[in-house]
Structure formats: C-alpha cells, structure tokens
Amino acid sequence: MADRIIAATGTAGSAYSGLAVPARRTLLPGPLWVRVLLGAVIPLAVLGVWQLIVVLGLVPAYRLPSPASVFLAGVDLYNRGLLYQHVAISTQRVLIGFTIGSLIGLLAASAVGLSKVVSALLDPPLGALRAVPSLAWVPLLGLYLGINEDSKVTLIAIGAFFPVFTTVSSALRHVDPQLVEAGRAYGFTGPRLLGLVQLPAVIPSVVSALRLALAQSWLFLVAGELLGASLGLGFLLVESQQNGRIDRLFLVIILLGVLGKITDALVGVLEKYLLRRWG
C-alpha cells in the first residue's frame, strides 16, 4: 500500500530517501568472509600490540595483564559455572529493558512527532530528563522499586527510551506532507496512517534509533547492576576492581564489547527485513 501511495505522490525520493540503500551495500567490500577478515584486522592488531607491550615489560603486570591471563580468567569462570550465569543474566536484563524502553520510546515519539500539542507538552520535561546521568537514577530507583530486578530493568529501559524517542520524533516531523496527504486520500487516519505511511517513511531513522538505544542499554547495564546485584557483568566488573583482579576486569570489558556487537548484529538483521518490506 505504501508503494501505491508513493507512486501516487511521486515523492519516493524525498520521503523514502533512506529506504533504498544500495549505496551502503556497495561500500562494503565483497562477500561476507572478506568483511569478516577486514573487521578482524584492527582487533588482531590491538591484540598483537598488547602482547608485545607485555613481553617487553613496558607496563607492569599488575596494571596490564597478558592476553593469555585474561583468557585463563575466562576459562576459570567457565569451569566454575559462573561465566554463563554472569553473561546470561546481563543479556536478559539488557534485552528486556531495551524492548520495554524502545516500545515506550516509539509510542511517545509517534505522539510527539504527529501532534504539536503533545510535542509542546512532552518535549520540555523529556528534554530535561534526557540530560540526567544514568548513575543519578540509581538511588531513586532503589528507593522506590527496591533492590531487585525491577529497578535494574527499569534503569536500562530509561537508557533505551531516550535515543528512540529523540530520533524517531524528529524524523516523523519531517515526513513529506504530500505523502501524508496521499495516505489520507486513501482513507488512512490515526494509527493506520502512522503504521502504513509515516513510520515506513522513517524506517532508517527507526533502525538508527534502535542501534543507539541498544548501545545505551549496555551502558546503563553497569549502573543498573550497582543496585545490589550478585550476578551480572556489571557486578563482576565492580567485584574485580575491588579484589584487584585486573585480568577479570579486562575480561568483562571484552565480553561487553563482544555482546554489544552481537546484539547490534541482530538489529542489523531486523534492518534488512524492514528494508526489504518497506524499501
């Protein structure tokens, strides 16, 4: 239906400028295995420099562990059955908080982006709340929600909410008016107009917002696991710092980066589906 509306308005270039993205694909060099090899160049180079610094003794071992000791720290946690627990509970918290925060952000962005009255009501307070650091929410959530999973997931949801809200609401304000009028001419109003015309027109912005929200969710995870957690990568990070286990500290940082990349790749799969559906 959206394709018919575009054909009727002749505004595909302006309204759906971000949907047909062959340029992005052509910039990627060759097949998947080539991209994987190129993506591994810098991590392998960093690993090599890291090992060289350790071998030459340029940094004391108590400040920079060797790659092998970091790996062995992971093996030790795995053999004791702890590594999976830390990774699983943190991933669960991030995915739940990300999903809740993104959905609420999308709903709020739709209301703000499509109504000047709602925008005037919500933009000032939400703009102020967006500037509140993640750690500032920790004592407040602990006070009202307690030291449990609810407070941790809520904090992550707050982190995911604002990138989606800000990006999508701004994109909806700039949807081509001719496209919207054509949708109304087809009899679409309210939620149908939003779901079939306006949101498809800003799919690239929605995907970008989800990527930012997911990255923000991992950032807020560590702050969330300060709320009395006994499991999770944030908890392991703080515990490693307190116990002087610099090898585990490096391990957690690496795991956070790897998990963040994996979940970002999942959003990439969603992006391909949406672009095939609406592009």
Image: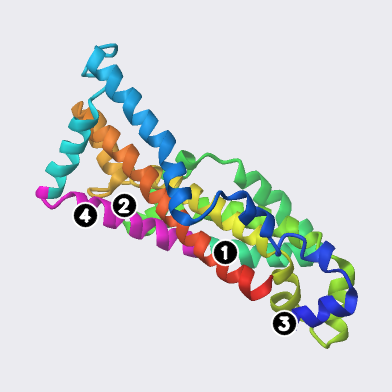
Q: Is 87 in the magenta?
A: yes
Q: Amino acid at mark 4?
A: Gln
Horizontally, residue 50 falls left or right of residue 122, namely left
Residue behind mark 1: 271
Mark pair 1, 4: CA separation: 30 Å
Q: Which mark is residue 192?
A: 3
Q: Is residue 151 in view from this perspective?
A: no
Residue at the far bottom in the pictured view? 187
Q: In 3D space, how far apart are the residues under numbered discs 2 and 1 (Cα atoms)?
A: 36 Å
Q: CA–CA distance between discs 3 and 2? A: 41 Å
Secondary structure under the numbered disc 2 in the rendered image: loop
Residue position marked by numbered label 4 in the rendering: 85
Which residue extends farthest left? 80
Looking at marks 4 and 2 on the same chain, the residue that comes earlier in the sequence is marked by 4
Q: Nearer the viewer, residue 161 or 186?
A: 186
Q: Position of residue 53 (x, y in %)?
A: 30, 17
Q: Amino acid at mark 3?
A: Arg
Alpha carbon distance from label 3 to label 1:
22 Å
Q: Dot 4, crowdedness within 10 Å: few (<14), some or many (≥20)?
A: some
Within 10 angstroms of label 2, few (less than 14), some, or many (20 or more) residues?
Answer: some
Magenta segment, which residues? 79-99
